[in-house]
Image: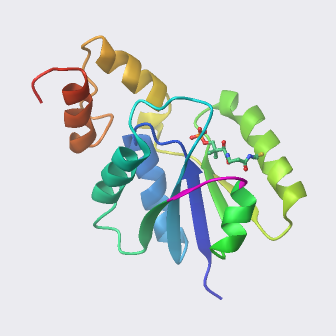
């Protein structure tokens, strides 16, 4: 039986921590669908189209990984694409409480989808899209924390030479 995993998130923007988890998931599952949530209450820094384009570009070498967007409940989307696993990353204990709540709510909503928590490489244990945006907004370097393409896009958005 082939196992399809969905790796959902905001990815605003994708970081090397996300990419590390995508690589680990692609080695573990038959295929992985990276799913970007559309229409959140939050106003994203990068548009959905920009986030899809950046993610597609950085996962290009992984043949069993695809990128898409979703709306509504994650478990409904997972069932729709026949994914039986939701992958979520846990960086530190502080992530655990929120992730546990989501995993248990999702389990209540659908018993057919199992959440699997994975740890990114420790190098990325402090890394988040929010911090990346904050550092780059103030002209700090995010080199090595995000893919080169994302680094260039951040600089461009902030009006710096890429
Ligand atoms: O990258 P993020 O912001 O931590 O991702 C959160 C995400 C997109 C996984 C979560 O907000 C989500 O699944 N939203 C879809 C709506 C839903 O299913 N909500 C109930 C989850 S308990």
Q: Check the picture and name the quadrant holding the C terminus.
A: top left
Residue 24, compared with residue 50, is above or below; it is below
Q: Position of residue 142 (x, y in %)?
A: 28, 26
Residue 71 highlighted magenta (yes or no) = yes
Ligand 1 image-quadrant field: top right
Q: Quadrant of residue 156?
A: top left
Q: Residue furthest top?
A: 138
Looking at the picture, how far across and down is residue 13, in whole percent?
40, 38
Majority secondary structure of magenta residues: loop
Residue at the limit of the structure toward the bottom, as seen here: 1
The residue closer to the viewer here, 72 or 135, is: 72
Please tell me in which quadrant of the rendered image residue 75 appears. bottom right
Residue 127 visible to an observer of this rendering: no
- Identified at 53% across, 69% down, the residue is 28
Which corner quadrant holds the N terminus?
A: bottom right
Left or right of residue 100: residue 162: left
The magenta segment is: 69-73
């Amino acid at each position: 039986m082939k196992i399809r995993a969905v790796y959902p998130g905001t990815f605003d923007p994708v970081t090397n921590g996300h990419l590390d988890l995508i690589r680990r998931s692609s080695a573990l599952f038959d295929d992985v669908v990276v799913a970007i949530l559309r229409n959140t209450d939050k106003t994203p820094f990068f548009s959905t189209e920009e986030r899809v384009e950046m993610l597609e570009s950085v996962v290009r070498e992984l043949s069993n990984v695809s990128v898409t967007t979703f709306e509504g409940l994650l478990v409904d989307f997972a069932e729709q694409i026949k994914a039986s696993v939701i992958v979520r990353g846990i960086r530190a204990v502080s992530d655990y409480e929120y992730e546990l709540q989501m995993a248990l709510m999702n389990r209540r909503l659908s018993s057919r989808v199992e959440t699997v928590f994975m740890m990114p490489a420790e190098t990325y244990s402090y890394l988040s899209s929010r911090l990346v945006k904050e550092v780059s907004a103030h002209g700090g370097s995010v080199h090595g924390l995000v893919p080169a393409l994302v680094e260039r896009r951040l600089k461009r958005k902030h009006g710096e030479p890429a």
